[in-house]
Image: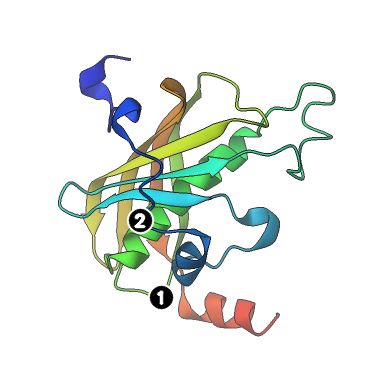
Amino acid sequence: MAAHELIIDPASIDCSRVVADMAEIRRWLPQRDAMEQLTAIVCDDLERRICVGYRDITDHEFWVSGHMPGAPLMPGVLMCEAAAQVLTYHIQRNDLSGCAMVGFGGIDNVKFRGPVRPGDRLMIAIEITKYRRGRLVVCRFQEFVGTRLVSEGEITGIPLPDNVLQASAAGA
């Protein structure tokens, strides 16, 4: 992939400059426990509509023993979920949605280009490409291990109806 197609050059990201740690991420995202796919946010640029986070992959992940036995690989669906969580953080933190929470509306053009294994740091960059407050937000995403592109695609986020969130909070 040519450099001009990158959302952001992964070599330019300083992961020691944390914008949001786990506690701050939890203020904006409802996922908990095994579904938390972010370690930190390191760039949240509202002007450029770009957000970058990362996930440190450990050998204690719930999927390590079964995907794939003896050669663990992070499941692609979790890589997509990590990108969706970076998008959701950016939307909710910057009040772009006009709703209580956004969820998956669609995922398109996803390509997996390399493995993600325990010990890796998965860097996730999103860039909003289409936006209609209260209706939808579309972003492209790219994920890297080091400077190697390991996945990319597009995610559509849509407002979740209040009754879904209320039922979830009530334990229904």
Quarter of the image with the N terminus in it: top left
Q: How is the image coloured?
A: rainbow
Q: Quadrant of residue 123?
A: top left
Whether residue 4 is situated above or below residue 47 in the rendered picture:
above
Instruction: Using residue 152 as the reference point, say whether residue 81 is left or right of it.
Output: right
Q: Is residue 44 left or right of residue 58?
A: left
Mark number displayed over residue 69: none
Q: Which of the pair 137/146 is nearer the observer?
A: 146
The spot of residue 27 in percent (x, y) is 46, 71
Q: Which residue lies at the image location 34% right of the left edge and 57% below the top edge?
A: 90
User: Please, is residue 149 above or below residue 153 in the view?
Assistant: above
Name the amino acid type tagged 2. Val
Residue at 32%, 58% (x, y): give it: 136
Residue 58, percent from left and from top: 68, 39
Pair 1/2: label in front: 2
Secondary structure under tag 1 reads: loop
Mark 1 → mark 2, Cα distance in angstroms: 22 Å
Residue 95 higher or lower than 5, as above or below: below
10 Å crowding of disc 1: few (<14), some (14-19), many (20+): few
Please count the marks in the image: 2
Q: In which quarter of the view is residue 31 placed?
A: bottom right
Residue drawn at x 40%, y 41% is 15
Position of residue 108 measured from the top left corner of the image (x, y, whole percent): 43, 36
Observer-nearest of 148 and 79: 148
Q: Which residue is identified by label 2? A: 19
Residue labelled with disc 1: 100
Residue lying farthest to the front in this orientation: 16
Circle 1: residue type: Ala
Whether residue 126 sits left or right of residue 47 in the image: it is: right
Residue lying farthest to the top in this orientation = 2
Q: Earlier in the sequence, mark 1 or mark 2?
A: 2
